[in-house]
Image: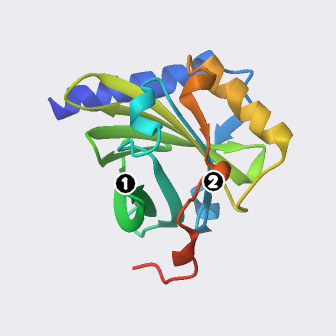
């Protein structure tokens, strides 16, 4: 069953890439990923997953490549007005630039460079108990980006079938910054 889900996820992620060849995205050089990142936007075709208190409304803090080609992510999540940190390790799949991780279901994702290596978009497909859904995250090296980059991300999300009411600008919310600067576990 897990293999079937992985195959379906890979097909969906690759199909998204193929369908949107006019989108300024390219595979990200993983050697450049190490360090602090900030969540700028989150979008999903299931709004409840990414709106306030949604299980997939998480804020990236740090990403580190591991020796075995996996990726270590440090996140913050806000619930009941409190921030709590957690980490995940995403395993590289057999497909180039495709990773999988268990969080709120089984997830398959691709990291794409957006404009330059200071901005990335993660295209994720989640397979939970209910039904598969897609999620896009826009991360940057700085806490905010230009209005032009924000507009471009919204266009990318819309091309993926995610429309404005399901796209959230996280620069306008508390992203749990007080823990910045703490060491990566």
Snapshot quadrant of residue 162: top right
Q: Which numbered disc covers residue 29? A: 2
Q: Which residue is mark 1?
A: 90
Q: Looking at the rendering, in which quadrant would you find the C terminus?
A: bottom left
Circle 1 SS class: strand
Q: Are marks 2 and 1 in contact (CB under 8 Å)?
A: no
Q: Residue 150, position in %: x, y?
A: 76, 39
Q: Residue 113, position in %: x, y?
A: 67, 45
Closest to the observer, 34 or 42:
42
- Taking the image as shown, residue 114 lies to the left or right of residue 164, namely right
- Vertical placement of residue 35 versus 51, above or below: below
Residue shown at 55% from the left, 75% from the top:
178
Instruction: Name the outermost residue toward the left.
Output: 1
Q: Which numbered disc covers residue 165? A: none
Q: Looking at the rendering, in which quadrant would you find the N terminus?
A: top left
Residue shown at 70% from the left, 61% from the top:
143
Circle 2 SS class: loop
Residue shown at 44% from the left, 62% from the top:
75
- Whether residue 45 appears in this view of the structure is yes
- Taking the image as shown, residue 39 lies to the left or right of residue 134, namely right
Mark 1 neighbour class, 10 Å CA radius: few under 14, some 14 to 19, many 20 or more = many
- Whether residue 73 appears in this view of the structure is no
Q: How many marks?
A: 2
- Taking the image as shown, residue 110 lies to the left or right of residue 132, namely right
Whole-number angstrom distance, CA of label 2 to CA of label 1:
16 Å
Closest to the observer, 183 or 116:
183
Instruction: Tell which tag, 2 or 1, sits nearer the viewer.
Output: 1
Q: Residue 24, position in %: x, y?
A: 75, 32
Q: Residue 69, position in %: x, y?
A: 42, 60
Mark 2 neighbour class, 10 Å CA radius: few under 14, some 14 to 19, many 20 or more = few
**Mark nearer the N terminus (2 vs 1):** 2
């Amino acid at each position: 069953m897990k293999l079937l889900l992985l195959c379906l996820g890979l097909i969906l992620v690759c199909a998204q890439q193929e369908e949107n060849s006019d989108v300024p995205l390219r595979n990200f050089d993983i050697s450049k990923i190490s360090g602090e990142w900030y969540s700028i936007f989150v979008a999903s075709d299931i709004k409840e997953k990414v709106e306030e208190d949604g299980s997939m409304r998480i804020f990236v803090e740090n990403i580190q490549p591991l020796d075995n080609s996996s990726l270590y992510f440090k996140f913050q999540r806000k619930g009941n007005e409190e921030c709590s940190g957690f980490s995940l390790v995403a395993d590289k799949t057999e497909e180039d630039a495709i990773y999988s991780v268990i969080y709120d279901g089984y997830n398959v994702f691709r990291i794409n460079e957006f404009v330059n290596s200071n901005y990335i978009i993660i295209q994720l497909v989640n397979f939970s108990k209910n039904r598969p859904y897609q999620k896009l995250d826009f991360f940057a090296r700085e806490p905010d980006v230009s209005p032009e980059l924000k507009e471009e991300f919204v266009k990318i999300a819309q091309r993926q079938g995610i429309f404005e009411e399901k796209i959230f600008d996280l620069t306008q919310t508390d992203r749990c910054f007080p823990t910045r600067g703490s060491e990566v576990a």
